[in-house]
């Protein structure tokens, strides 16, 4: 498996920037492009409209900077100030990500000394675009 240490440290640190006053659940994400650039994200909640997940923040930052080719995303999340737990993209994010990635895109969640790897096809089996 490729070395994800830098991405994991960055994603963990991004949890500190989460704006999660309603759920108290903080998530950090690090999206890596195929040319090796990294874009970070954290969840940003809102009382009035749908909150924005860390994954979509990272994708929007990258896409708005002109990025088109994505390799992987590392997601670390859990209750505020607690150790990370298994945290995978929500259904809305899975559909969103599906628009922008190829079949080889990897999704990692990190918790309890584990790094689990998923493909989007595994997480979105019925509407995966080919
Ligand atoms: Zn989401």
Image (spheres, grey):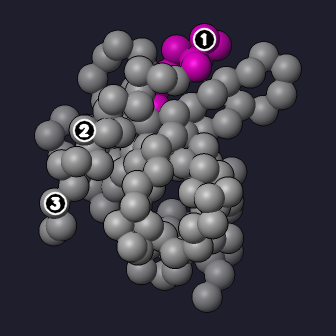
- Quarter of the figure with residue 8: top left
Residue that badge 3 annotates: 3
* Residue 63, quarter of the rendered image: bottom right
Q: Identify which residue is drawn at 48% across, 70% down.
A: 70
First along the sequence among labels 3 and 1: 3
Q: CA distance from mark 3 to mark 1?
A: 33 Å
Q: Which residues are magenta?
A: 19-27
Number of marks present in the image shown: 3
Front residue of this view, candidates 30 and 23:
30
The kind of secondary structure element at disc 1 is loop
Q: Is residue 122 visible?
A: no
In the rendered image, residue 26 lying in the magenta stretch gets the answer: yes
Residue occupying the point 43% across, 36% down: 28
Q: Which label belongs to residue 21? A: 1
Residue depicted at 52% across the width and 75% down the height: 69
Q: Is mark 3 within 8 Å of ligand 1?
A: no
Picture coordinates of residue 72, whole percent (x, y)? 40, 64
Does residue 122 lie above or below 102 as drawn?
A: above
Q: Say which quadrant the C terminus sits in.
A: bottom right
**Label 2, label 1: how many angstroms apart (C-alpha)?**
23 Å
**Label 3 residue SS:** loop
Q: Which mark is residue 9?
A: 2
125, 98: nearer the viewer: 98
């Amino acid at each position: 498996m490729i070395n994800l240490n830098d991405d994991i440290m960055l994603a963990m640190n991004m949890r500190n920037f989460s704006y999660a006053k309603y759920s108290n659940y903080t998530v950090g994400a690090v999206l890596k492009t195929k040319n090796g650039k990294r874009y970070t994200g954290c969840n940003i909640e809102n009382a009035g409209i749908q909150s924005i997940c860390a994954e979509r923040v990272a994708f929007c930052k990258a896409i708005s900077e002109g990025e088109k080719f994505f390799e992987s995303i590392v997601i670390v999340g859990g209750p505020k100030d607690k150790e990370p737990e298994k945290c995978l993209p929500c259904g809305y994010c899975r559909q969103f990500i599906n628009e922008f990635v190829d079949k080889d895109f990897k999704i990692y969640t990190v918790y309890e000394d584990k790094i689990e790897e998923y493909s989007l096809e595994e997480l979105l089996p019925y509407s995966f675009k080919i």
